[in-house]
Image (spheres, rainbow, N blue to C red):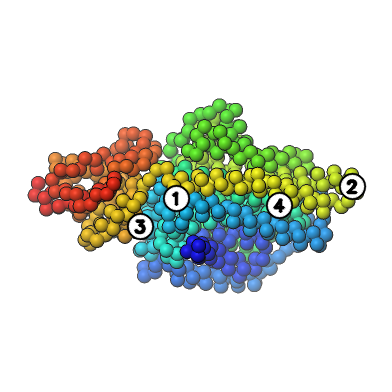
């Protein structure tokens, strides 16, 4: 038990301590901000440390992170001390539509909100603990191949600068193909303290898309209520309810991990609600907070640059909705937001340049779905259908969430309050519907979709980011309406009755929705971790890696296909591989040319010359690799097919001159290559 709890506590320490300390030295005592920005600010610090590690002689490590933390904390503390960070709050007109709670009920509401947030965070974490059955369990999805070996590379080499990641040659570290490195940076730090790259990667993923997402949604709900001038009792309860709803959602985290191991997008989206909450609640001349907001956004950007669209477009929607009311126009504090943008730009400069270089390639990807009828697109998104690979027939849905969200929409229309919550959900709902009906020619596909590889599952996940806020508003207003009805009949105070009504409503949601949702999430994750439906790495791979590690000579490379368990040879033992990208990379044409034609070396002098130049000593073959989508990712279209499983050049190698079987177990074979035989051909 403690073998699982201690790594979890260590990872929690890594992800929260830097962000919490920087906020505290900046004078932030607002629980909303601490919930919203702690993890993003920590990620931002890791990104800055990664840039600093690019200085010769410095290595990305916990010690360097501590040094950068100190260097940032001192000027931030001086800035906070020299400038006033507090301004009188402006109470929006009409804020008294929610009754005032007595001091005793206020205390109970705050405790209730905090308890709901804590319980929701644990509930969101439980499916990961159950579905992984151990933090060191190997992930089996396609994208995690890259995430995990990059984590190991950062840990082994101390390399963390964006212009040094992702190296295509593990021996030389060059050339580099830009890759979002926020999660691998955090995972490498965590793994160094908890038991290796795999444990670090799994822990960071689970905490970011679980508890961090839950607290970000709680902060956004509290920010919306605070913007309405609601008292702290209602603000606390709204945050707690939103956290509870967020804890059971299938999107973004669980589905993106289940349907492709899409970790950077999942984590960046999970951090977005908190960043939006901070941007909505920052006040005039709160310069230290502006620095923190910029650093938090930088952290999310380094995780995945698409967060520019997630946060940027969502904030535009918020400000557009707020502009309809006099109180709303007070929210956009442009000077501090411009400072935050400047801080984010400086902190992400290296990653920004790399992202711009990749934008043309990823923005040109074709959509991953075919057009659907309007009724299907509307219905499945309204009821939060699971869909994807878990539920291809879309027969299951999170109906309880849908009921609360629709109740929230009705409450906004009836009370004419909370337009921001309705606008955020409705906007992304319309984007997902339009994308689903016109994935190739629609406006959403050609604009917002370009930030997300024109992937429907990524675009659709945005609806879930803002559903908890609207659901919290709906449940609160429903409880208040029932309480007012009871109070009118019984002549009792409204607020205590509201609290009494909320308790059974929340208990019912917990039993009837939250727990079943969590169980299904755990089952989905188990199908990719503890009890995988398909296998990339298993005991045979681990045995092959052990065998290789005892025999490989310095400077030798291993020919492989990165679509199987071979990449774990580098993760576990630091064995240099020819292929670390599943379909090869255009910067190193030999990567995919060898995948296509390695077995032709007896007849092709160019292939023999390349093998000798790379000093390939072994060939790693797994005959049962999973099928993956190739899309437009194959350079020069060398594959000529929409899917990829086994490299053509690594089939039927038995009997080729200079090759002999050195290790064989199950579907894995490792051949010893005699380069002298090749040189003599």
**In screen coordinates, is 484 left or right of 426?**
right
* Mark 1 or mark 4, earlier in chain: 4
User: Distance from label 3 to label 4 (Cα)?
Assistant: 43 Å
Q: How far across and how far down the image is residue 148, in percent?
A: 40, 54
Above or below — where is 400 with respect to 204? above
Q: Dots 1 and 3: beta carbons under 8 Å?
A: no
Residue pointed to by mark 4: 238
User: Distance from label 3 to label 2 (Cα)?
Assistant: 67 Å
Q: What residue appears at the point 39 percent right and 43 percent down from the top-left corner?
A: 534
* Mark 3 or mark 4, earlier in chain: 4
Q: Dots 1 and 4: beta carbons under 8 Å?
A: no
Residue 466 image label: none
Camera-nearest residue between 421 and 540: 540
Residue 571 image label: 3
- Give SS at disc 3: helix
Residue 490 image label: 2
């Amino acid at each position: 038990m403690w073998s699982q709890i201690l790594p979890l506590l260590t990872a929690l320490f890594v992800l929260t301590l830097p962000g919490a300390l920087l906020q505290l030295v900046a004078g932030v005592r607002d629980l909303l901000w601490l919930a919203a920005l702690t993890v993003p600010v920590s990620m931002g610090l890791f990104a800055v440390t990664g840039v600093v590690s690019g200085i010769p002689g410095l290595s990305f490590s916990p010690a360097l992170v501590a040094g950068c933390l100190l260097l940032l904390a001192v000027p931030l503390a001086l800035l906070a001390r020299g400038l006033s960070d507090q301004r009188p709050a402006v109470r929006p007109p009409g804020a008294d539509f929610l009754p005032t709670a007595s001091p005793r009920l206020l205390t109970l509401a705050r405790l209730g909100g905090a308890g709901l947030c804590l319980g929701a965070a644990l509930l969101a974490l439980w499916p990961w603990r159950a579905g992984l059955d151990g933090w060191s369990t190997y992930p089996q999805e396609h994208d995690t191949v890259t995430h995990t070996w990059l984590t190991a590379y950062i840990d082994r080499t101390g390399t963390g600068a964006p212009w040094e990641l992702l190296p295509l040659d593990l021996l030389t570290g060059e050339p580099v193909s830009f890759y979002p490195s926020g999660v691998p940076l955090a995972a490498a730090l965590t793994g160094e303290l908890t038991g290796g790259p795999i444990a670090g990667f799994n822990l960071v993923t689970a905490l970011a898309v679980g508890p961090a997402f839950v607290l970000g949604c709680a902060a956004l709900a509290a920010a919306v209520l605070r913007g309405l001038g609601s008292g702290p009792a209602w603000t606390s309860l709204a945050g707690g309810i939103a956290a509870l709803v967020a804890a059971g959602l299938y999107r973004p985290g669980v589905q993106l991990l289940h349907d492709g191991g899409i970790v950077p997008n999942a984590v960046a989206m999970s951090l977005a609600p908190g960043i939006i909450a901070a941007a909505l609640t920052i006040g005039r001349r709160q310069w230290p907070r502006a620095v923190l907001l910029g650093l938090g956004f930088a952290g999310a950007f380094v995780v995945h640059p698409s967060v520019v669209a997630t946060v940027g477009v969502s904030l535009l929607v918020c400000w557009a909705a707020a502009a309809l009311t006099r109180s709303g126009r007070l929210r956009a504090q442009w000077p501090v937001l411009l400072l935050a943008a400047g801080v984010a730009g400086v902190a992400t400069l290296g990653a920004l340049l790399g992202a711009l270089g990749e934008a043309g390639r990823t923005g040109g990807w074709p959509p991953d779905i075919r057009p659907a009828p309007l009724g299907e697109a509307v219905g499945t998104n309204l009821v939060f259908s699971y869909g994807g690979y878990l539920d291809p027939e879309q027969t299951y849905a999170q109906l309880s969430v849908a009921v609360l969200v629709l109740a929230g929409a009705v409450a906004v229309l009836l009370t004419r309050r909370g337009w921001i919550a309705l606008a955020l959900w409705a906007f992304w709902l319309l984007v997902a519907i339009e994308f689903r009906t016109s994935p190739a020619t629609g406006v959403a596909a050609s604009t917002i979709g370009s930030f997300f590889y024109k992937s429907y599952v990524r675009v659709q996940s945005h609806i879930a980011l803002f559903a908890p806020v609207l659901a919290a508003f709906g449940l609160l207003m429903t409880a208040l309406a029932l309480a007012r009805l009871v109070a009118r009949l019984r002549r009792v105070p409204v607020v205590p009755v509201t609290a009494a009504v909320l308790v059974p409503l929340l208990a019912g949601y917990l039993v009837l929705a939250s727990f079943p949702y969590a169980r299904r999430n755990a089952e989905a994750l188990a199908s990719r971790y503890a009890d995988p439906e398909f296998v990339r790495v298993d005991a045979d791979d681990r045995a092959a890696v052990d065998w290789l590690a005892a025999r490989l000579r310095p400077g030798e490379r291993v020919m492989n296909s990165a679509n199987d368990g071979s990449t774990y040879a580098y993760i576990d033992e630091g064995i240099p591989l020819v292929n670390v990208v599943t379909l090869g990379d255009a910067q190193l044409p030999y990567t995919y040319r060898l995948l296509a034609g390695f077995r032709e070396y007896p007849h092709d002098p160019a292939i023999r010359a390349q093998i000798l130049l790379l000093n390939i000593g072994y060939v790693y073959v797994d005959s049962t690799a999973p099928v993956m989508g190739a899309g437009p990712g194959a350079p020069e279209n060398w594959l000529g097919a929409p899917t990829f499983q086994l490299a053509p050049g690594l089939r039927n190698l038995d009997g080729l001159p200079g090759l002999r079987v050195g290790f064989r177990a199950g579907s894995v074979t490792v051949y010893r290559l005699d380069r002298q035989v090749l040189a003599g051909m």
